Amino acid sequence: MSDNCLLSLVVSPAAADSITDWLLAQDTVSGFSSHAIAGHGSSEHSMSLAEQVAGKRGQIMFQLHMRCDDARTLVQRLKQDFSGSGMHYWLLPVIESGHLA
């Protein structure tokens, strides 16, 4: 088993450009993926009326494959620099990864 993790970050579309720039400036981040997602859940108090009617909220997910220690450090920096942003994150172990030739 490797010491690599998959860090997923979910942010509002308004914060996506700031997060992208911030991630690109981090020495431990060699690259990442981002894509638009629809968030569904029970937190209606934080959703606009249109989002409540649609039953979903547009969000952006970033995914970073990196060493677990670096991912934990990155999360601590995110907590400092993006406190109050409502960003949601999770960290999962990567069992195996590689490139197919």
Image: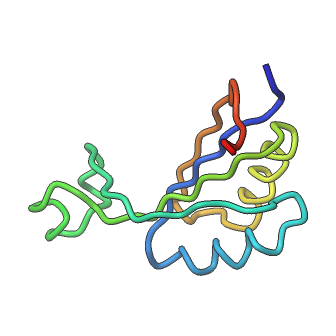
Report x, y in % for residue 43: 30, 49
Q: Position of residue 97 (x, y in %)?
A: 70, 35
Residue 68 location, quadrant: top right
Q: Residue at x 30, y 57 (%)?
A: 38
Where 80 sits versus 6, above or below? below
- The residue most toward the right is 27
Q: Quadrant of residue 62?
A: bottom right
Where is residue 16? Give x, y as percent: 54, 74
Q: Residue at x 58, y 80 (%)?
A: 17
Q: Nearer the viewer, residue 19 or 67?
A: 67
Chosen colour scheme: rainbow
Q: Tell me the residue at 83%/41% (across/down).
A: 67
Nearest the camera: 53 or 1?
1
Name which residue lies at 64% across and 32% down: 92
| The residue positioned farthest toward the left in the image shown | 53
Q: Position of residue 53 (x, y in %)?
A: 9, 61
Of the 4 image quadrants, the one containing the C terminus is top right
Q: Residue furthest front?
A: 101
- Looking at this view, name the residue that lies furthest to the top: 1
Give the image quarter of residue 58: bottom left
Q: Quadrant of the N terminus?
A: top right
- 73 horizontally vs 35: left or right: right
Q: Left or right of 26: which side holds 44? A: left
Question: Would you say 56 lies left or right of 62 here?
Answer: left
Q: How many marks?
A: 0
